[in-house]
Image (cartoon, rainbow, N blue to C red):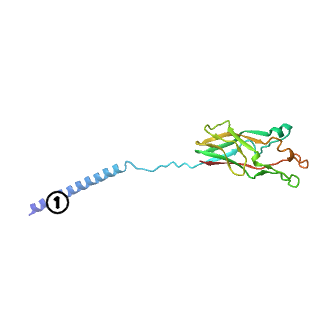
Amino acid sequence: MHRFKSHTQEHFNNDKKMKKTLLFSALLAVTAFTATAQSSAEVALSVTLHPIQTIEINSGKRVNLDYVEKDHYTNGVTSDQLDHLSIYSTGAFAVNVRSTATTLKNPNTAVVTTDIAAKDIKITPSLGSSELRGSVLKTVRLSIEPQLLISNTKGGFDKKFNINYAAAGADKYVNKYFKEESPTVYSTTVVYTIEAQ
């Protein structure tokens, strides 16, 4: 009977060893699987581009078209503003120009009883010192409605555009001078805007 117990005890000990071995093997397999499962991980990466458009006036905030000589009244007056506009655009863009009023006025309306039509003023763009090739440039007459002046299918950084301002000749303004307001100045505000295309 003692021998039977010993044999049973030995069998029990062997079972216990086998269970430990199986448990250890199972743990080893789980650890190996976990190590393999954690050897890589993923993350979603996005680059999100938002449109940015800026426009600046470089050469002063005032443009004067001065009629000083007889030829000015006959032939008109122009003013070339070099590198007048600087633009920054991510991607395609359009630049529009408009006047804040339909006419150029003199503030002393008690004396100056006439005005000058905004459409008398022509605005012509050209490429500046930092040019953006492929730009479509249009000569426009100033209007209260936005007029497409410059466009491009590509963007650029700090690109420059010259602007030529021209006012009428053919003696159109001979009778718009008033001695009580000398010199007689007519003015409006010109607004340039840029937008993504």
Going by the picture, which residue comes out furthest to the top?
Answer: 129
Q: Quadrant of the N terminus?
A: bottom left
Compared with 23, 161 (above or below) is above
Asked if residue 69 can be seen in this view, the reply is: no
Percent across and percent down for residue 84 are 71, 41
Residue 179, image x and y in percent? 91, 47
Residue with the mark numbered 1: 12
Residue 15 appears in which quarter of the rendering?
bottom left
Location of residue 35 in the rendering, given as x and y in whole percent from the top left corner: 34, 50
- Which residue appears at 31% of the width and 51% of the height? 33
* Crowd tier of the residue under label 1, counting other residues whose Cα lies within 10 Å: few below 14, some 14–19, many 20 or above: few
Residue located at (86% from left, 38% from top)? 70
Q: Which amino acid type is marked by label 1?
A: Phe
**Horizontal relation, residue 100 to residue 132: left or right:** right
**Secondary structure state at the residue bearing disc 1:** helix
Q: Which one is nearer the viewer's eye here, 6 or 57?
A: 57
Q: Residue furthest front?
A: 170
